[in-house]
Amino acid sequence: MRSVRVEVPATSANLGPGFDTLGLALDITNVVTAVPGGDDAVLEGGVVDPHRNLVCDGWHAWRAAHGVDLPGVTFRMEADIPFGKGLGSSAACILAGVTAAAACSGPWSAHDVLDVAARLESHPDNLAAAVMGGLTAAICDGAGVRALHLAREIPLDVALFLPDQALSTAAARHTLPREVPLRDAAFNLGRLGYLAAAVTAGKWEEMGIAMTDRLHQPYRASLVPGLTEIMQAALDAGAYGASLSGAGPAVLALAPLTSGERIAAAMLRAAHAIPCRGETRVAAVRPFGLTVNTLEHAPER
Ligand code: HSE
């Protein structure tokens, strides 16, 4: 078996109204190299348990799902996706392990990878965008994941405010009510449809209203100090739309090309006024999803 290198993008889920369905791939990536050898799957690096982590879980999930006999493997990860910030780092780690196992097993498809990864993460939004790139809509239908592109190329800057404090998705989901009023569900359905239409038509100036939400952001705002103010600062500075990124705590703004740094600076000023400490990044939308390369030689340590 040869070594395999998997590059998986960060993703921002929901974009406001698309709770658990919309995902946007960004040009921030984790690169995981799988080097065959040993008796077990092991992740080097020392940050997490080498045997029990999402990369190894992904590897084992593929093996179990397809009944394949895989050798031991050592994973090396170069991680650029911030952990616990709402940018799909869990999805990226799961997908790295699943995809490495798939690539070591024989023919595989992106759809197979998505289906297996979805067994380890309850919502398919980040996973679909990370596999397919661009802006995706994904659903689970019981048998597996169905996902389609709303757009691959999105000519916008993505300004991000990343609070210092991480937030677990489990904690952020715990704040959500089990039931919501019909008027709030209808509010989100309307915005989601309108968002899809705005993206399809490239009417970015409609994204501000399209990205509003009543199903999760109002409940999560208590966990993300300054969320409302930071989103408003982005809009006031000229962003087309703003939302909590996934379960948070990162805040995302979609901005006209070349204005991302200016809008990120406005978000940072608003955060400091709360005060909420953090940093900013400006990203682009990645039009393609994860990539896999087979290496001729094991990489140098
Ligand atoms: N749709 C998920 C949530 C995304 O909002 O909980 C988590 O990254």
Image: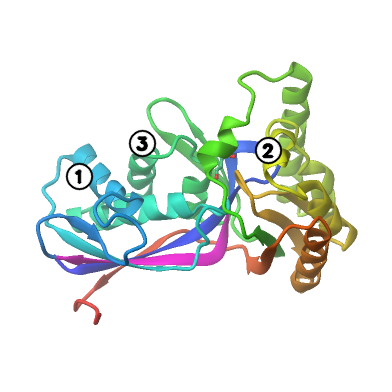
- Closer to the chain start, of discs 1 and 2, is 1
Quick check: is the Cβ at mark 1 less than 8 Å away from ligand 1? no
Instruction: List the residue tagged with mark 2.
Output: 220
Mark 1: which amino acid? Arg
| As drawn, 87 above or below 139 | below
Disc 2 crowd, CA 10 A, few/some/many (<14, 14-19, 20+): many
Q: Which residues are magenta?
A: 24-36
Question: Can you name the residue that lies furthest to the front here?
Answer: 275
**Is 170 left, or right, of 116 in this rendering?**
right
Task: Say which amino acid is labelled 2.
Answer: Arg
Q: Position of residue 96 (x, y in %)?
A: 35, 57
Whole-angstrom CA distance, mark 1 to mark 2, is: 36 Å
Residue 30 position by quadrant: bottom left
Asked whether residue 28 is drawn in magenta, I would say yes
Quick check: 92 left or right of 217?
left
Give the vertical position of 301 relative to 25 (above or below).
Answer: below
Q: Which element is circle 3 on?
A: loop
The residue that disc 1 covers is 63
Q: Depth check: 2 or 299 in front?
A: 299
Residue 182 in picture, x, y percent from top left:
74, 17
Q: Is residue 203 visible?
A: no
